[in-house]
Image (cartoon, helix red, strand yellow):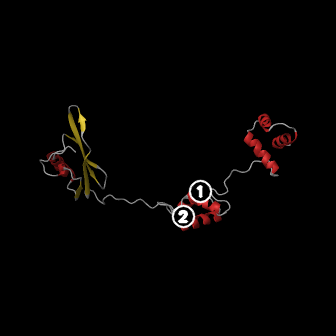
Amino acid sequence: MSLRSEFVALAKGHGISVTELAHRFGISRKTAYKWLRREAASEPLIDRSRRPRCSPMQTAEVCERAVVALRQQHPCWGGRKLHRVLLNQGHDEVPAPSTITHILRRHGLMPGSQVAGGPKPWQRFEHASPNDLWQMDFKGTIAVGTGRCDPLTVLDDHSRYNLVLQATPDMRGATVQRTLTETFRRYGLPVRMNMDNGSPWGSPGGDSRG
């Protein structure tokens, strides 16, 4: 006789309370009453499998078809809503809400989801050749001792190489002009330059503190 069968037999015929028996057998009262309910229903006193009937990786085909069909009828419904409605409709083996969400993504029925075939390749946005485009920017004023430092950067868009990374004393147009003149002599002239609309990029006498 198994321990569970022994427990049920003692609970039914020896006038011992369920609480006391549960203590003797080292189980909770909840488990004790579960065994008694199963015995009363003529169910076997063995553990039921906890494995989900429909796993996220391989849901039964009939479940998946029902999920997809209902989602197509109601495009705004998510996993929880679909789960609840499928239960109310009497479907067998209804997947968990999280599994339903996996199904929707796999079929491309979720915003931003990819259909089978994998992600799309990355698109490259940099220019095709060096000096096609330079990006110029001040990185903000940094306090240095009793003064200041304004880091200036110039980046070649194709190679992603920093042509200039210089600690300038200010952001005046004249300072920018001197730096660019030296850079042009070293690397040549760019086809285009990209910068914001700040005054350092305007007249040589302009002054801006960002």
Marks 1/2: CA distance? 13 Å
Check residue 8 in the rendering and tell me which mark sits there, or answer none.
Answer: none
**Mark 2 closeness class: few <14, some 14–19, many ≥20 residues within 10 Å:** some
Q: Quadrant of the C terminus?
A: top left
Camera-side residue of 108 and 78: 78
State left or right for residue 38 relative to residue 110.
right
Element class at badge 1: helix
Dot 1 or dot 2: first in sequence order is 1
Q: Residue furthest top?
A: 145
Element class at badge 2: loop
Kindly identify the residue that appears in the image at 77 percent across and 42 percent down: 32
- Residue ID for mark 2: 107
- Asked if 77 appears above or below 169 in the picture, the reply is below
Camera-side residue of 39 and 114: 39
Q: Amino acid at mark 1?
A: Thr
Q: Residue furthest right?
A: 13
Position of residue 80 measured from the top left corner of the image (x, y, whole percent): 57, 56
Q: Quadrant of the N terminus?
A: top right
State left or right for residue 26 relative to residue 161.
right
- Asked if 72 appears above or below 13 in the picture, the reply is below
Q: Amino acid at mark 2?
A: His
Position of residue 185 measured from the top left corner of the image (x, y, whole percent): 17, 51
Camera-side residue of 210 and 58: 210
Check residue 99 in the rendering and tell me which mark sits there, or answer none.
Answer: 1
State left or right for residue 30 relative to residue 65.
right
Position of residue 192 measured from the top left corner of the image (x, y, whole percent): 23, 58
